[in-house]
Image (spheres, rainbow, N blue to C red):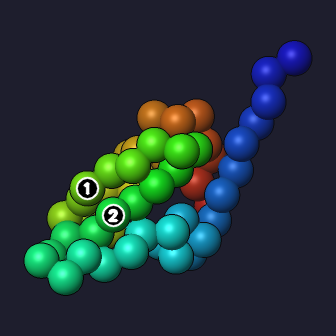
Amino acid sequence: METVKTASFEYLIDLAKENPEGGYTFVLDGKSYQIQDVLEISRIATEHGYIVIY
């Protein structure tokens, strides 16, 4: 049986922490990403197998 993972977009955005030098650090499932725009979060979450709820 496959597990379905869902997350709201608002919740995922809250996981992104703004960096003083610009951009954001986003951690999902223990993996850290340096992103420039929070809109990248949807793509990352989808790659991790999440269904993003807007």
Q: Quadrant of residue 18?
A: bottom left
Residue 14: x %, y % from top left: 52, 76
- Residue at numbered disc 1: 34
Residue 48: x %, y % from top left: 52, 36
Q: Which mark is residue 16?
A: none
Q: Amino acid at mark 1?
A: Gln
**Contact flag, marks 2 and 1 (Cβ < 8 Å):** yes
For image coordinates 46% across by 35% down, the residue present is: 47
For image coordinates 87% across by 17% down, the residue present is: 1
Number of other residues with Cα within 10 Å of mark 1, as a class: few under 14, some 14 to 19, many 20 or more: some
Label 1: state its secondary structure: strand
For image coordinates 58% across by 44% down, the residue present is: 29
7 or 15: which is nearer to us? 15
Label 2: state its secondary structure: strand
Residue 15: x %, y % from top left: 51, 69
Image position of 31 with respect to 2: above or below: below
3 or 31: which is nearer to us? 31
- Residue at numbered disc 2: 25
Give the distance between the C-alpha atoms of the residues marked 2 and 1, in whole angstroms: 5 Å
Horizontal relation, residue 47 to residue 10: left or right: left
Q: Is residue 9 visible?
A: no
